[in-house]
Image: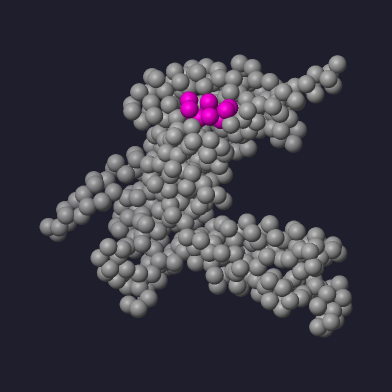
Amino acid sequence: MEKASITKTTNSWNTINWAKVQRKVFKLQKRIFQAVKSGNKVLARKLQKLLFKSYYAKLLAIRQVTKESSLTSLTKGGRRDVKGAEICAIKDRAMQALVKLALEPYWEAQFEETSYGFRPGRSVHDAIGRILQVIGNKPKYVLDADIAEWFDKINHDYLLSKVDCPSNIKKIIKQWLKSGVMDNGVFAETESTTSQKDVISPLLANIALHGMMKEVRDNFPNSITREGKAINNFQPTIIRYAHNFVIFHRDYEVIKQCKILIRKCLKKLGLEIETEKTKICHSLNEIEINDQKVEPGFDFLGFNIRQYPVEKHHSGRHYYSGKKFGFKTIIKPSEKSIKNHYKKLRDTVDKYKKAPQSRLIMELNPIIRGWCNYNRVVCSGKIFSKIDHLLWCKLRAWTVNRTGKANKQKLSKYFSDGIHGKWTFQDGEYCLLKHDKIEMKRHVIVESDASPYDGNWTYWSNRKINYPETLTRVTELFKKEKVYVNSEK
């Protein structure tokens, strides 16, 4: 009887019209977003309650966290079984996904435009592109900082005071925060933590940090007069991606003040700047701080961002006036990212030194494709070629290890004429990807006030087509976007 019941439930699950489910949920989310944008938060909270009770929202929440959804049920409670259940139990994660469906559009209508981490429709590449916009025309001082243990140290009371949602949802969130963590069979109390593995934790962390950038900027006037000249846009620019953020300004003293202000803002949350990963530098020039020289440029999200003085023939120029700057801004993969990537390739080759060639290629290709897709939007051509050469040398050594002293006849068993030339690493069925054969692709950053919840089908459908690798969250929302577009028509 139990087996028959499971089979019946599974069959019912497989017949659900998911396009209809997504459409119903998204319509409510869109109304929540629009209500907040228009300033009607009372209506928005009523719609949140409606979505939280929605049968369609519960189905979608379950689907998001498990393939065995037919065996899971949702109840009104949200507290974990701390006596033995894992923190990321299926039921708990499904409930978190449901709460997130209600909270996310409400906060997407309010989040600052230069906040990019853990937000639908926004990617690392959008943050990097925004940095290029900020410093592309003029060199600036930079505060490059990380927030230490931002998931582990957030003050619960402060977070709950900011969540701003219906009381029943807030009560469930409070239970999650206070219920504890089960790590490798050991239970620990969580008086001031939210697990990074939780479905809803990134959103809660963004809510806690919301307003920090505005609070810092508001300490400075938008324009000042200096030596009889008006200076506009004097407020610092802050770009945040999760716990990483950078602050830009033309004045060194302003950057120093920003660092002090950031510490004060974070203290209210129970957080602090990670000292070892925080530095002040300049995008173009070498500077001296506390009798120590600081090289120009900085690393951010796996990229190195720096400006180089160049002659007029190589100089960047103003987009509208055509005026040459005398420097060029170059963004490329950071040295740490390059070393980590090659180490992963090298370790994979060593791990599969006794495996068939096809197995090694199958293991290497996803690593190469993933890293190249991440880095192909910046100046990576020379670096891609360099890694290809290092990997070729490693694969040649792999071949020698299997065949003995290398000669053309022995190497030809593994290297042959193919799509990458005479030295293509292939076995007739599988062919190794080359970094420098991955197409370079410029990334156009997301519009500052755009959100997938705004209902702009044309804009988001086009971004989904052009930048699928950076829009995984939006892909879920617009999985059936052709149905949506046609229904609008």
The span shown in magenta is 20-29
- Quadrant in which residue 353 is drawn: bottom right
- In this view, the residue in front, 266 or 173, is 173
Image height of 195 relative to 177, above or below:
below
Residue 214 pos. (x, y %): 34, 40
In the depicted view, which residue is nearer to us: 77 or 356?
356
Q: Is residue 78 above or below residue 420?
A: above
Residue 401: % across, % down: 84, 73
Picture quadrant where residue 264 is located: top left
**Is 107 positioned to the left or the right of 52 in the image?**
left
Main secondary structure found in the magenta portion: helix
Residue that appears at 27% across and 69% down: 323
Residue drawn at the location 29% of the way across and 71% of the way down: 324
Q: Quadrant of residue 308?
A: bottom left
Q: Is residue 471 left or right of residue 15?
A: left
Give residue 4's position: percent from left, percent from top.
83, 20
User: What residue sits 47% from the left and 60% below the top?
Assistant: 442
Quadrant housing the C terminus: top left
Residue placed at 33% from the left, 26% from the top?
Answer: 39
